[in-house]
Image: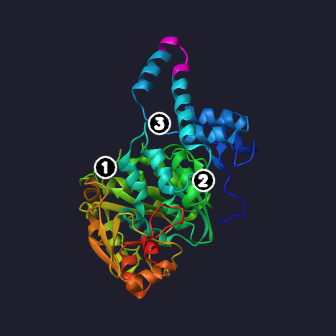
């Protein structure tokens, strides 16, 4: 379905085409359909009707990019002050107290962090997820350590079946970890969609700067015309949406007739999950909501083992739902079946090699000793497979260190790269390169 122009954006409320009117520099604009208006901040259209989005729209109209960015980035969780403000609003008949609480949060965020970019992905995550009033350490660990968890490895394996060219939609893309993988193929045009502007901002500034990013809900009609995409990816998200059946229908709607959906890491509610998601389904339930797309289900444990051992994945090894009731997590393919085969992608040429943040490095006489440290007791419970490929201890000798300083893998370090002790991450990620200190 490849076209030379970007996929058109539709208003999520009435499906009318949106027109973009720039309102300043730095990716600031207003999108309107004749009935509704939405801001675009940092080059990210925000197709939401929330207090933050409305405040950002006013700033966008005024051409104030810094204020619009702060309105959407300032973290907030519902707390005592918000409850009191809502009660006061009901008594007064106007939302001015809630607006005042929000204005103070935004001002505090700007005083603390200014209006410039964060130095690293790690610093930005800490500001958005760890600082009051939004202490979410589990979310911080999930996003920062995602490149080495099993859900990401399976996504890496499954998305090796995505065509190397055409329009690709990454649904619920978060901060862009999977989006970054998809963007490696230069023939693809990637659109990432997520409800969180803060996470999309991290994708824009650190992980997937070349992707087109859209802030919108995934459990509402998607803001794209039917048949817009050659492939759609949704990783570790469908079981946590408010309307998984609606999302399934929308995925199939926006796919071209020859397109394939790659839906990765679906929780089976018959098994314990630290966070099970809002709407996990049994294997038969996932197949039912994708019935119109010839759904094919695969056991993710088999996909993970094959990817780790041989760096290959057989997407033709689907099984009927009744045979997968014993699978803890599942991958589902729907739509065209051209991806249903064995995939062996070419070797990765690392760009910026770093130490996995789950490891602490200790100097030794002729190298470094590495020790794995889980970020919390819950981490190995949620990802029991991680211990099978992340060794508790490892060594880096002179040969490995010499290569790593030059961003190449000596023969002795290839196995550590395969087992995710060494990672290839962007320079601004915030992960460490302890071998540089041993030069």
Label 3, on which residue?
Answer: 76
Mark 2 is surrounded, within 10 Å at the Cα level, by few (under 14), some (14 to 19) or many (20 or more) other residues, namely many
Label 2, on which residue?
Answer: 213
Q: Is residue 319 left or right of residue 127?
A: left
Q: Is residue 32 left or right of residue 114?
A: right
Q: In this view of the protein, which residue sits in the foreground, 391 or 30?
A: 391
Q: Which residues are magenta?
A: 90-97
Q: Is residue 275 left or right of residue 186?
A: left
Is residue 47 visible in the rendered image? The answer is no
Q: In this view of the protein, which residue sits in the foreground, 309 or 203?
A: 203
Residue 42 position, x and y percent, is: 65, 48
Residue 370 position, x and y percent, is: 32, 72
- The quarter of the picture where residue 22 lies is top right
Taking the spot 64% from the left edge, 37% from the top edge, the residue there is 67
Task: Please say whether residue 306 is one of the residues in the magenta stretch.
Answer: no
- The quarter of the picture where residue 362 lies is bottom left
Disc number for residue 6: none
Residue 226 position, x and y percent, is: 61, 53
Q: Earlier in the sequence, mark 2 or mark 3?
A: 3
Q: In this view of the protein, which residue sits in the foreground, 293 or 8?
A: 8
Q: Earlier in the sequence, mark 3 or mark 1?
A: 3
Taking the spot 57% from the left edge, 61% from the top edge, the residue there is 208
């Amino acid at each position: 379905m490849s076209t030379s122009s970007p996929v058109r954006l539709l208003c999520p409320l009435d499906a009318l085409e949106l027109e973009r009117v720039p309102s300043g520099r730095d990716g600031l604009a207003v999108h309107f359909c004749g009935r509704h208006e939405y801001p675009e901040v940092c080059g990210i259209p925000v197709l939401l009707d929330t207090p933050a989005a409305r405040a950002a729209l006013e700033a966008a109209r005024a051409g104030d990019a810094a204020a619009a960015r702060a309105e959407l980035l300032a973290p907030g969780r519902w707390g005592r002050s918000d409850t009191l403000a809502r009660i006061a609003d009901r008594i007064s008949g106007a939302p001015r107290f809630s607006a005042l609480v929000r204005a103070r949060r935004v001002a505090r965020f700007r005083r603390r962090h200014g209006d410039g970019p964060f130095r690293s992905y790690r610093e930005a995550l800490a500001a958005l997820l760890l600082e009051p009033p939004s202490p979410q350490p589990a979310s911080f660990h999930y996003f920062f350590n995602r490149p080495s968890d099993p859900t990401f490895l399976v996504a890496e394996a499954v998305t090796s079946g995505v065509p190397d060219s055409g329009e690709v939609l990454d649904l619920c893309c978060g901060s862009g970890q999977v989006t970054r993988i998809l963007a490696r193929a230069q023939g693809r045009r990637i659109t990432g969609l997520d409800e969180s502007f803060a996470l999309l901002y991290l994708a824009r500034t650190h992980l997937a700067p070349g992707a087109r990013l859209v802030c919108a809900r995934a459990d509402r009609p998607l803001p794209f015309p039917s048949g817009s995409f050659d492939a759609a990816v949704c990783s570790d998200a469908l079981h946590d949406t408010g309307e998984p059946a609606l999302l399934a229908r929308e995925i199939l709607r926006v796919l071209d007739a020859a397109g394939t959906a790659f839906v990765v890491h679906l929780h089976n509610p018959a098994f314990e999950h630290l966070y099970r998601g809002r709407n996990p389904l049994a294997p038969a339930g996932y197949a039912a909501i994708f019935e119109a797309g010839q759904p094919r289900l695969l056991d993710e444990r088999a996909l993970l083992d094959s990817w780790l051992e041989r760096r290959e994945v057989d997407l033709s090894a689907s099984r009927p739902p009744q045979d997968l009731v014993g699978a803890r997590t599942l991958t589902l393919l729907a739509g065209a079946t051209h991806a249903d085969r064995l995939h062996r992608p070419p070797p990765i040429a690392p760009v910026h090699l770093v130490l996995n943040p789950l490891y602490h490095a200790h100097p030794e006489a002729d190298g470094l000793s590495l020790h794995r440290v889980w970020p919390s007791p819950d981490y190995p419970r949620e990802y029991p497979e991680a211990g099978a490929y992340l060794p508790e201890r490892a060594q880096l000798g002179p040969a490995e260190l010499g290569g790593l300083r030059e961003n190449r893998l000596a023969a002795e370090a290839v196995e550590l790269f395969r087992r995710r002790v060494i990672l290839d991450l962007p320079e601004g990620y915030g992960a460490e390169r302890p071998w540089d200190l041993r030069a």
